[in-house]
Image: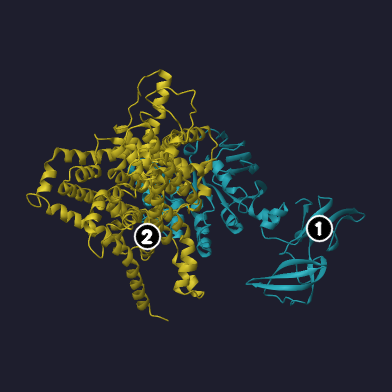
C-alpha cells in the first residue's frame, strides 16, 4: 500500500505530464509566434520602439477604432440579451412540441463561418436578396429600396444572430434547474409575480447572466468577418484595422500595437469571465427538468411561446433558409422582374462551381477547396482532442488549486488574440528548422487547433469535473487499476462530451477565416476563402457561386451539429 | 368554530386525476395531519389550499368566506416546503424577514419579529448565518421560522421532517408540537409517517390515491379504522375473508377462525381483520383458536410472531416478557371478538 504522500507525488507527476503537451503547444505555436511578430514589428519602427505607441495614441482613427470596437460590442450584447433572456425563460420553464428541434437549430448560427453568415444575410436583406426583390416587385421600385449591407444594422443583426444561442444555453440551462419552489415560497410569503422575479429569480440568475453577457461581449469585441464583409469600409474594429494595416498598408509596427492592445483588453475580460464562471458553482438546490418545466396551459403562456418562437425563428432560421433558397433561384436584381418563361429554380450556380469560365491559371475547382477544408478539419479534430483531453482532465483534478485558476484564462487567450496577427506570426516565426513549417500542410490545422482548443477544453472540463471521486474509489476498491479506472469509468462518461468537442473543433476549423486568410496557399484555398473570393467580385455568377458554396458549408455544419445534438449530455458543459 | 373548510375538491393534471373529492375542516387553533403514502395527492392538496393551484371543482373557505379568485400571495397562509426552499442568496435574517417585508412591516418590527421567531424555534443569534452552511435540523427550523414569522392565519407543513435522519426527526417532532401549540397556530401537517401524524395532530385525514379514507382523532382511527386501506396503513395485517350470517342464536361470523358470535352491522361477505395487538397466549379470551408458530422477531418490548392458523399466516405482537413458543411449536390463542375483530365491507 503506497503512502499517501507518494500517491500525491505521483499524481503531481501525472499532472505535470498532462500539462506538458497542451502548454508546450501553446508555447511553440502561440507565445513564440506572437512574441516574434511583436519583436519584428517593433524593431521595424522608425524612430524607436515607442514611436508606434505614440502614433497609435495620437491617431484619431485608432481612437475611433477602439471606441467603435467597444460600443458596437456593448450595443450588440445588449440587444442579444434582450432577445436571449426571454428565450432562455422559454426554454427553461416550458415544455412544448418541437422544443428540442428548435433548441438544436439555435446552435447552428454559433458555429457558422462568418462568410456564410454574411452570405446568408446578403441573400435575405442584400440588394439582391429576398426582401428587396419582394419589395421591388410589390411596389414597382426600379432599384432595391432597402439598404442593409454596409450599415450598422447589419453588424448588430449579425452579432445577435451569432450569439443569442450563448444566452439561450447558458442562462436557459441554469434557469431550468432552479427550484420552482423558491418562487412558490416567495408567492406564499406575499410576493406577487414581479416582486418574486426581481427579488428571488434575478439575484440568483445575475451571475450567469453577467457571465454570458461577458462572453458575448468578448466575441463581439473581436469580431472580424462580420465587420469586414457586412459592415463594409466604413466600419472597423481593432481586428479589422489590424488586417488593414498589415495587408494593405504594411504598417507592421502599428498593427503590432493594436494587436497588443486587443490582447490586453481581451485578457482582462477573459480573466473576469473565468472568475465569474467559477463562482457559478455555488451550492444551489438544483432540480431535474421533469419538475421544473410545465406544459402550456394558460393562454398567456401559449401567447408568449408563440411570440418567442416566432422571434427566434425569424432571427436565427430565416437567414439560413434565405441562403439555401437563394442559391437555387435564378433572380437578377438588375432585370428587376422575375422571368416567367424561365424556370426559377436552378442548380446552375452549383454547376458553375465546377466550370473554369475564364480559363484562369489560378482557378481552383471548388471540389478541391472542399477536400482541402475537410482534411484540415479532420486534422484539427485530431490535434485539438490530443491537446484538449489531457488539459481538461488535468483541470478536473484538484479544481480549487491556484494553478488551475491561473491557467484557465491562459487557455482562453487564443480566443481573444487577433487571428490575423497570429497568422502573420506563423509566417515570421516558423521559418527556421526545426520549425520551418511555412510550407507545411500542418500549418493551417495548427492555427485552427489554436482557435478550437479553448472550446474543446470548455466542453470537456465540466463533465470531467462532475465525475464524483466516489465512483473512481469504488472502482479501485473493486480491483480496477488506475488505467482501468480511466477506461471504464472516466471515458464512457466523457465519451459523449468528446463527441461534442470534436464536433466543435470540426466546425470551427471548417469556418475559420482570419488566420487562414493570412497563411493559406493560393492553390489550396479553404471553403471560406473561396467564398470570400466570389463574394468580393461583381457579377451574378460570382454572387451565385458564393451562395451555393456557402449553402454547402452551412449544410455540412448544420448536419454535424444536429447529429451531435443527439449525443450531447444535456445540462453539462458550457456550450 | 371552523377556520378552514375544504369541500369536495377535485383536481386533475392532464389526464391524471389527483384529487377526487376531498372534504374536511380545520378548527381555529387546531392541528390536522394529512397522512398518506407517496403520490396520494397530499402535496397537491396543500398547494391547492395555498392558492398555487386552482381546483377544477369544489370550494375552499376560510371563516366561511370562499377563497376562489384570491391569489396565493394574498391569502395570508404559510407553507413550509418539504426541502425547505430557503432562498440561497439571502442569509437567515433576510430569509425570515422576507414575508414581513412583503407585508410592509416597519424595520424595527421586522427586526423584533425575526429575533422572536428565531428564539421560538431555538436558534437565537443565527441572524447572519449563510443558509447554505446550515445543518438539516437548523435548515428545518429556519424554514419553520420563515413561515411562522408573518403570523399566517393557517400554516401548512409539507413533510417538513422528511429529509432528516431518524433521531433528529424524533426529537424535532416534539419541539414542533410545542412551538405550534404555544403560538396557537392553526396547522395542516402533511406526512407519510403515521407516528409523526399521531404525535403532532388532534385529528388526522387519511388519504389514498386522491380520496379521503377516514377523518378522525388518532385514537379513534387507531382503534377503529373504517377502511382496509387505513388499517393497512396503520400497520395492521391479518386480513382474511369471512361471512356474516344470521342464525337462530344471533349473528355469527364464519371464517378461518371458525364460527364466532359477533355484533355486526354488515351482513354477507366481509373482510375480517384480527388485530395483532389484542390476542392472548393464555386462555383469558372468550374465543379460542390454535396454530403453529412460524417465526419470531424480537423487537425490544414487543415480540412479533407469525403463526399459521388454519392455513393462513397471521402476525401478532406479544409482550416479550412472557414465554412465547418457539418456531415449529403449537400454540393456543384466545381473544375477545369485541376488541379484537374488525369487519370491513367486501370492497374495503
Q: Which residue, given by chain and number where applicable, does mark 2 sit on?
A: A383
Q: In the visual, does A173 lie left or right of A5?
A: right
Q: Is residue B258 visible?
A: yes
Q: Chain B in the picture: what colour?
A: cyan
Please state the horizontal and vertical placement of residue B335, each as a whole percent of the image: 78, 65
Instruction: Identify the chain of the residue marked 2, using the numbered disc in the image.
Output: A
| Structural crowding at the residue carrying mark 1, measured as other residues with C-alpha within 10 Å and reported as few (<14), some (14–19) or many (≥20) | some
Instruction: Identify the residue at the far front of this view.
Output: A359
Is A300 in front, or is B57? A300
Please state the horizontal and vertical placement of residue B141, each as a whole percent of the image: 45, 55
Q: Chain A in the picture: what colour?
A: yellow
Numbered disc 2: secondary structure = helix
Please state the horizontal and vertical placement of residue B276, each as a whole percent of the image: 72, 64
Q: In the visual, does A43 lie left or right of B108?
A: left
Q: Which mark is residue A511?
A: none
- Residue drawn at (72%, 73%), measured in percent from left and top? B295
Instruction: Identify the chain of the residue marked 1, using the numbered disc in the image.
Output: B
* Nearest to viewer (mark 1 / mark 2): 2
Q: CA distance from mark 1 to mark 2?
A: 75 Å
Question: Looking at the picture, does residue B18 appear above or below residue A483?
Answer: above
Question: Looking at the picture, does residue B327 appear above or below residue A285?
Answer: below
- Residue drawn at (27%, 38%), measured in percent from left and top? A72
Question: Looking at the picture, does residue A38 appear above or below residue A242?
Answer: below
Question: Looking at the picture, does residue A442 appear above or below residue A67?
Answer: below
Q: Which mark is residue B241?
A: 1
Amino acid at each position: 500500500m503506497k503512502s499517501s504522500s507518494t500517491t500525491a507525488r505521483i499524481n503531481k507527476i501525472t499532472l505535470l505530464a498532462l500539462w506538458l503537451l497542451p502548454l508546450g503547444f501553446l508555447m511553440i505555436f502561440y507565445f513564440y509566434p506572437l512574441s516574434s511578430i511583436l519583436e519584428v514589428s517593433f524593431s521595424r519602427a522608425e524612430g524607436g520602439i515607442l514611436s508606434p505607441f505614440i502614433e497609435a495614441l495620437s491617431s484619431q482613427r485608432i481612437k475611433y477604432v477602439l471606441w467603435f470596437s467597444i460600443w458596437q460590442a456593448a450595443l450588440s450584447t445588449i440587444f442579444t440579451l434582450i432577445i436571449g433572456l426571454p428565450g432562455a425563460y422559454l426554454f427553461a420553464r416550458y415544455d412544448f412540441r418541437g422544443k428540442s428541434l428548435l433548441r438544436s437549430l439555435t446552435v447552428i448560427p454559433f458555429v457558422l463561418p462568418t462568410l456564410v453568415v454574411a452570405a446568408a444575410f446578403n441573400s435575405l436583406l442584400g440588394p439582391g436578396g429576398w426582401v428587396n426583390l419582394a419589395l421591388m416587385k410589390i411596389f414597382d421600385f426600379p432599384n432595391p429600396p432597402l439598404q442593409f449591407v454596409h450599415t450598422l444594422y447589419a453588424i448588430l443583426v449579425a452579432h445577435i444572430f451569432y450569439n443569442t444561442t450563448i444566452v439561450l444555453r447558458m442562462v436557459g440551462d441554469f434557469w431550468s434547474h432552479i427550484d420552482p419552489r423558491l418562487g412558490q415560497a416567495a408567492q406564499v410569503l406575499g410576493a406577487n409575480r414581479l416582486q418574486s422575479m426581481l427579488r428571488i429569480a434575478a439575484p440568483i440568475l445575475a451571475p450567469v447572466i453577467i457571465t454570458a453577457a461577458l462572453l458575448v461581449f468578448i466575441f463581439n469585441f473581436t469580431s472580424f468577418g462580420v465587420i469586414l464583409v457586412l459592415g463594409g469600409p466604413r466600419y472597423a474594429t481593432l481586428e479589422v484595422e489590424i488586417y488593414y494595416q498589415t495587408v494593405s498598408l504594411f504598417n507592421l509596427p502599428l498593427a503590432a500595437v493594436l494587436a497588443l492592445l486587443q490582447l490586453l483588453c481581451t485578457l482582462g475580460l477573459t480573466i473576469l469571465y473565468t472568475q465569474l464562471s467559477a463562482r457559478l458553482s455555488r451550492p444551489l438546490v438544483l432540480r431535474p427538468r421533469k419538475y421544473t418545466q410545465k406544459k402550456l396551459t394558460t393562454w398567456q403562456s401559449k401567447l408568449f411561446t408563440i411570440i418567442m418562437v416566432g422571434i427566434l425563428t425569424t432571427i436565427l432560421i430565416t437567414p439560413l433558409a434565405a441562403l439555401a433558397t437563394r442559391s437555387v433561384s435564378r433572380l437578377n436584381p438588375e432585370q428587376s422582374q422575375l422571368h416567367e418563361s424561365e424556370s426559377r429554380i436552378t442548380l446552375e450556380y452549383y454547376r458553375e462551381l465546377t466550370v473554369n469560365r475564364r480559363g484562369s491559371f489560378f482557378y481552383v475547382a471548388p471540389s478541391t477547396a472542399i477536400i482541402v477544408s475537410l482534411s484540415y478539419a479532420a486534422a484539427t479534430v485530431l490535434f485539438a482532442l490530443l491537446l484538449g483531453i489531457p488539459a481538461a482532465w488535468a483541470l478536473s483534478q484538484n479544481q480549487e488549486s491556484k494553478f488551475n485558476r491561473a491557467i484557465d484564462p491562459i487557455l482562453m487567450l487564443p480566443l481573444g488574440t487577433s487571428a490575423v496577427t497570429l497568422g502573420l506570426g506563423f509566417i515570421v516565426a516558423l521559418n527556421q528548422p526545426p520549425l520551418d513549417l511555412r510550407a507545411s500542410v500542418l500549418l493551417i490545422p495548427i492555427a485552427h487547433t489554436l482557435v478550437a482548443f479553448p472550446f474543446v477544453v470548455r466542453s470537456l472540463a465540466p463533465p470531467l469535473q462532475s465525475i464524483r471521486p466516489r465512483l473512481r474509489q469504488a472502482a479501485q476498491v473493486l480491483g480496477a487499476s488506475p488505467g482501468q479506472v480511466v477506461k471504464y469509468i472516466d471515458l464512457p462518461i466523457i465519451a459523449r462530451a468528446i463527441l461534442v468537442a470534436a464536433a466543435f473543433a470540426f466546425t470551427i476549423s471548417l469556418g475559420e477565416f482570419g488566420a487562414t486568410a493570412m497563411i493559406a496557399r493560393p492553390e489550396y484555398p479553404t471553403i471560406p476563402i473561396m467564398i470570400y473570393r466570389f463574394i468580393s467580385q461583381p457579377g451574378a455568377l460570382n454572387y451565385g457561386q458564393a451562395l451555393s458554396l456557402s449553402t454547402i458549408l452551412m449544410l455540412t455544419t448544420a448536419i454535424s451539429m444536429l447529429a451531435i445534438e443527439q449525443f450531447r449530455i444535456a445540462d453539462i458543459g458550457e456550450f | 368554530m371552523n377556520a378552514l373548510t375544504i369541500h369536495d375538491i377535485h383536481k386533475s393534471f392532464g389526464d391524471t386525476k389527483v384529487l377526487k373529492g376531498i372534504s374536511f375542516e380545520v378548527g381555529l387553533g387546531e392541528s390536522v395531519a394529512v397522512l398518506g403514502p407517496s403520490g396520494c395527492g397530499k402535496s397537491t392538496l396543500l398547494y391547492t389550499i395555498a392558492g398555487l393551484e386552482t381546483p377544477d371543482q369544489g370550494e375552499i373557505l376560510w371563516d366561511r368566506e370562499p377563497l376562489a379568485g384570491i391569489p396565493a400571495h394574498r391569502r395570508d397562509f404559510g407553507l413550509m416546503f418539504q426541502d425547505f426552499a430557503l432562498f440561497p442568496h439571502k442569509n437567515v435574517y433576510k430569509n425570515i424577514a422576507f414575508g414581513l417585508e412583503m407585508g410592509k412591516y416597519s424595520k424595527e418590527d421586522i427586526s423584533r419579529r425575526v429575533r422572536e421567531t428565531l428564539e421560538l424555534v431555538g436558534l437565537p443569534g443565527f441572524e447572519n448565518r449563510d443558509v447554505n452552511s446550515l445543518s438539516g435540523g437548523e435548515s428545518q427550523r429556519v424554514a419553520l421560522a420563515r413561515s411562522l414569522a408573518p403570523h399566517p392565519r393557517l400554516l401548512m407543513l409539507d413533510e417538513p421532517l422528511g429529509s432528516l435522519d431518524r433521531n433528529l426527526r424524533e426529537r424535532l417532532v416534539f419541539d414542533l408540537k410545542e412551538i405550534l401549540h404555544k403560538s396557537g397556530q392553526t396547522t395542516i401537517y402533511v406526512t407519510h409517517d403515521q407516528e409523526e401524524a399521531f404525535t403532532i395532530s388532534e385529528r388526522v385525514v387519511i388519504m389514498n390515491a386522491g380520496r379521503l379514507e377516514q377523518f378522525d382523532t388518532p385514537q379513534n382511527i387507531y382503534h377503529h379504522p373504517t377502511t382496509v386501506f387505513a388499517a393497512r396503513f396503520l400497520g395492521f395485517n391479518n386480513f382474511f375473508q369471512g361471512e356474516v350470517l344470521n342464525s337462530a342464536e344471533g349473528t355469527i361470523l364464519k371464517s378461518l377462525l371458525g364460527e364466532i358470535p359477533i355484533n355486526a352491522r354488515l351482513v354477507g361477505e366481509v373482510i375480517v381483520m384480527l388485530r395483532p395487538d389484542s390476542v392472548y397466549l393464555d386462555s383469558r379470551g372468550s374465543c379460542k383458536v390454535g396454530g403453529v408458530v412460524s417465526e419470531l422477531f424480537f423487537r425490544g418490548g414487543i415480540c412479533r410472531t407469525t403463526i399459521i392458523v388454519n392455513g393462513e399466516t397471521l402476525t401478532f405482537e406479544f409482550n416479550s416478557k412472557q414465554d412465547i413458543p418457539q418456531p415449529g411449536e403449537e400454540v393456543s390463542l384466545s381473544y375477545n371478538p369485541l376488541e379484537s375483530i374488525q369487519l370491513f365491507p367486501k370492497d374495503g
